Amino acid sequence: MSKFLELTTALLLISTFAHADGLGLGRDALPEEIAAWDKDVSPDGTGLPEGSGDALTGEEVFADKCAACHGDFAEGIGNWPKLAGGWGTLDREDPVKTVGSYWPYLSTTWDYINRSMPFGDAQSLEPDEVYAIVAYILYSNDLVDDDFELSHENFAGFEMPNAEGFIVDDRIETEFPKWVGEPCMENCKDEVEVTMRAMVLDVTPQVESGEAESPSPAAADTADEAMAEPAEPVEEHIAAIDPALIAAGEKVFRKCKACHLVGDGAKNRVGPVLTDIMGKPAGQVEGFNYSSALADMADEGLVWSAENLKAFLTNPKSFIAGTKMSFVGLRKDAELDAITAYLTSLAR
Amino acid sequence: MTNRTSRRSFLAKGLATGAAATVAGSANSATSDPLITEVQPWAQGLGDGVDATPYGLPIEYEADVIRRNVDWLTADTISSVNFTPIHALDGTITPQGCAFERHHSGAIELRKEDYRLMINGLVDRPLVFTYADLERFPRQNHVYFCECAANSGMEWAGAQLNGAQFTHGMIHNMEYTGVSLRTILEEAGLGAAGDLAGKWVYVEGADASSNGRSIPMEKALDDVLVAFKANGEALRKEHGYPVRLVVPGWEGNMWIKWIRRIEVMDGPVESREETSKYTDTLADGISRKWTWAMDAKSVVTSPSPQSPITHGKGPLVITGLAWSGRGAITRVDVSRDGGKTWETARLAKPGERMAVSRFYLDTDWDGEEMFLQSRAMDETGYVQPTKTQLRDVRGLNSIYHNNGIQTWWVRPDGKAENVEVS
């Protein structure tokens, strides 16, 4: 660990550390407060709560909470991370780094899902759900059978395939000796020829109107294409909306984009496609599995008028008790007006 | 629907303005300049009163000096990155408003009143601080650069993005005000940790990504800051308001924003961001981990693809930035012929540890094409390598820590392109 600091400096720093009484600032952290925040899990399993879950259960939870971005088989949709596959690709061009092919510790998967997933609804999973999802991801990677059950008891014994695939930073030993000393100043090479040009690849963002952007060969999959262009506003009542308000609404919509797509070819994700909902009866987007709470209100005749949309977005869980939407809501009237204008502008 | 000036139209405008300036501004001009001979509106009427902009933004004529992102890089702007317009800035301090952003779950809004910082783990007294508590500790001021480990990461396989903003813009350089992490750890007491050699601190943010990183105790007790001001004012939301960690010289991912918890531990957590990400895969498939320090690096910011030469041959200022995560920049050399011959540039002021240096080469351009390069050296004697040298050691799959020498191909018309040369 002393690679990055002179060993002597490191020892000096540590040995001169003063065990002072301090300034008396702050207050004692209470045990329940520490328990609420200290949730990290180490490679040996330290930090895991009791619980268990099997791969088959995990498949159901995964389909419900993860598959919108990561795919039914953890294969990843668009630019969203692939969680399965990629074995044997690490030494090839464009390696595929997944939980199975790359991640060195199982604890990392459990810890990350538990604290940071699902995207947009973090820290909402029960421990048994996390165990089940992790078991399913292992199953998706062909690392366990479908009857495999993961628990706090068998967790530490699970070794990941790429556990030995990492070395500690060795740049100072392997690189520094090559690249120190007085550099060449004259006649350093015989000729200079262009070997690669950015203009040829032409993937630099251009924001000019009407100009097609060349997609990267490595990216720009279906999800991005679907997000790229909202439908053109054509109808007359739409033309009356202030374009600046629509533009502002498009910005506000960034808060929604993780779960909702708009535009031609958009697909339902965690939330339904919102291209053509304004002024329409609620709960009608084809193929989306609405909460029973929203479905009930739709049956009672809920229509997405501007007024209803704003009321919903101000406090989703209050307007539709039992909605699946985890969004906390928009507080500012300006944002509510803007998002309403934007979604109205998308209506066909 | 955004009304951003496009790079191409900006370039065209710049070239046109430049051509006009060459005529109108020339000392040899035969016709008089109406900007001088005619009374202009701004010399006659009145400007804005003092309260026109209680918090000032750049004048509209600088509207193109903004952060930009590259849509195809990431699935979503919520978990994404954008780039500092380094091609259009000078000096060394990055204004907060255009300093690059990198979020994992979006930039959250956290009030000072709602802010809490917990210190727990192997400490004598687990503590909770409020924001007001932090302001009562002795403060320090330091200028440090923050560079994302993935800066220039898109260039591993070859020249790809055409602009210094995109190739090198995941960096900013600010003056931070904050409290030494050492002071805060002392407040909680490290007696419970016993022998500190081999101990770690795990630092974690308050946002939904729970981004967390493990930092070895030597670094934690050395120069890490718990910072709440940048360039004299509160941190911006996108940079971790109200409090972020500053880890001088080390990759930006460790500079935890909205920092809420610091845990003293026996070992590293091996979190997602220090295993599946921010590890550098070599050609043989083995990956380096704990590659924290950012090696010496530099780039010519002007001329560059977004900042072409518009004045024709004659006096030319070549300028750029250099930095090292292992100490101060001591020297920057510039080549105009793709690395055959080098000239030592002028540092605007002596290099400072873990801070950006500005260099200038005040020269006379003959109007011929140039292959512009810069090469940084730091106080350890390290010389910034070429991309070929880097690839010989690491292969093409490292993603992170690309500090190879950049080449701009400047044409006789003053336009520049990102290229690689033999």
Image (tube, rainbow, N blue to C red):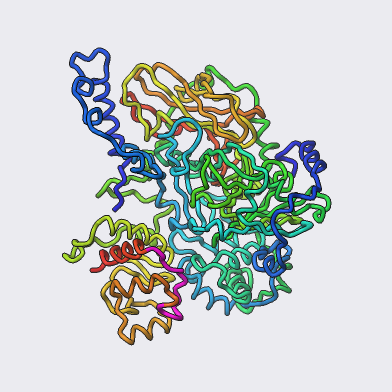
In the depicted structure, whether residue A308 falls above or below residue B85? below
Disc count in the image? 0
Counting from the top left corner in percent of width and height, residue A165 is at: 66, 53
Answer whether residue A327 is magenta in the image.
yes
The image quarter containing residue A148 is bottom right
Drawn side of residue A191 relative to residue B34, left or right: right
Q: Position of residue A133 (x, y in %)?
A: 58, 72
Residue B147 on the magenta segment: no
The residue under the point 20% across, 25% down is B39
Main secondary structure of the magenta stretch: loop
Residue ranking furthest to the left: A236
Along the line of sight, the residue nearer the viewer: B95 or B412: B95
Residue B352: x and y in percent read 60, 30
- Residues B18 and B206: in front is B206
Task: Look at the image and tell me in which quarter the N terminus of chain A lies.
Answer: top right
Instruction: Pick the quarter of the image with the C terminus of chain A.
Output: bottom left
**Would residue A37 be found to the left or right of residue B35 on screen?**
right
- Residue A42 coordinates in the image, percent (x, y): 70, 62
Position of residue A61 relative to residue A169, above or below, is below
The reply to whether residue A102 is in sight is no
Q: Is residue A35 above or below residue B179?
A: below
Point 35% across, 64% down: residue: A333
Image-quadrant location for residue B249: top right
Residue A327 appears in the figure:
yes
Find residue B323 and report its image quarter: top right
Image check: B141 left or right of B364? right
Most foreground residue, A44 or A317: A317
Q: Residue at x 45, y 33 (%)?
A: B420
Magenta-drawn segment: A319-332
